[in-house]
Image: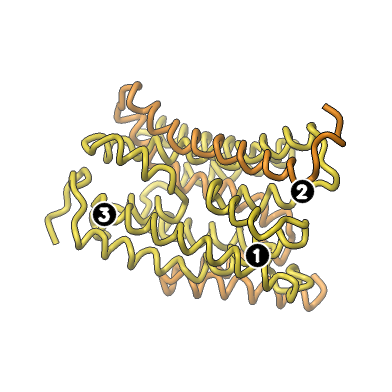
Amino acid sequence: MSAPTSSFHPQITRAGLFEGLRGAMAFAPGFIIFGAAIGALAAQHGLSALQIFAQSALVYAGASQMVSLQMWQHPWSWAGVVAVVSVTAAVNSRFVLMGAAMRPDLAALPQGRVYGVLFFLTDASWAIGMRPAADGGRDFGALVAASVFLYLFWWVTTLVGFYLGALISDPARYGLDLIMVFVFTTFLTPILRRSVHLLPYAIAGAAALAAHRLGASHWTILIGALAGAFSAAMARP
Amino acid sequence: MSQDAFSQDAFTWTIILISAVVTYALRAGGYWLMGHVALTPRVRRGLEALPGSIFIATALPLAVKAGAPGMAGAAATALAMWLTGKELYGLAAGLATAAGLRALGF
């Protein structure tokens, strides 16, 4: 293990790859439940196996996949297409912010590789790849290993969910409709645990709730996230 | 274009492909943008607070909307994560709490 530094090592190390794989394994059970719920939803809405596979392989963003499948229409209209694509963009707008946060650490790397690995950016791979040095992270290898593992794993879990979905007739009965809440809470808890300042997170939550109450339901994520980041930026260090 | 000219299948593929392009643009766009804007300590502090802000802004409205099973389930997930540090236990606690409360009629 090399000494912790403020930026990524400009190469992929074996230790980093192992660290990323270990981190990704921790998310595997969550991915199984989340992916299976999405596969089941796709089956209910009449997507083919190839279509849910393509959605998982090309869009590869669980939260937006789940939200768009919940909005699936029969039959489609062009207005419906615009609505689904807009919501997908709103839910995934958090990637803009995550990508922005990665810039300082990845700027020294070959940019072709960075833009390649950005295709695989998810909440989990980001949480693993951007972990502070104290946790053993900060190595490009961790991000690469976590990204590839979780990506391939996502194909499997959504397809398994697609075929098994018929067996779960009422997901709400098992709390499975709330899986996204619980997955994101598992992401959030360690961050709150090691944070010195909790106020920005309280502001982020309050802003998102307010936006939700006022009817901006598809934009709550972006509004809350920007409120939290802005208040952290404005606070005295 | 009329609806008949475009089958349900064609709509599905159109949505998947547009969503894929839009999502990659968002993934790459923030990173690209930061290469063209100076990073001050303020901006850095803001970016550091982003992950937690995003997660809470996503989860909290959904939990509140779901009522008692959503809020108690999220609290159980957070408590289990805080105590054990393992995602699996957090998810199990959340699902068990939500399923239990729903079984009781909440």
* Residue A112, quarter of picture: top left
Q: How many marks?
A: 3
| As drawn, A95 above or below B67 | above
Determine if marks 3 and 2 fall on one subunit.
Answer: yes
Q: Secondary structure at mark 1?
A: helix
Q: Which of the pair A107/A116 is nearer the observer?
A: A116
Image quadrant holding the C terminus of chain A, namely: top left
* CA gap, disc 3 and disc 2: 38 Å
Q: Is residue A174 visible?
A: yes
Q: Is residue A90 visible?
A: no
Residue bearing the label numbered 2: A72
Q: Amino acid at mark 1?
A: Ala
- What's the residue at 46%, 32% (across, down)? A230
Q: Secondary structure at mark 3?
A: helix
Residue bearing the label numbered 3: A141
Chain A colour? yellow
Q: Residue B25 placed where, x, y %?
A: 49, 33
Q: Are marks 1 and 3 in contact (CB under 8 Å)?
A: no
- What's the residue at 66%, 66% (across, down)? A162
Q: Is A181 left or right of B65, judged from the image as shown?
A: left
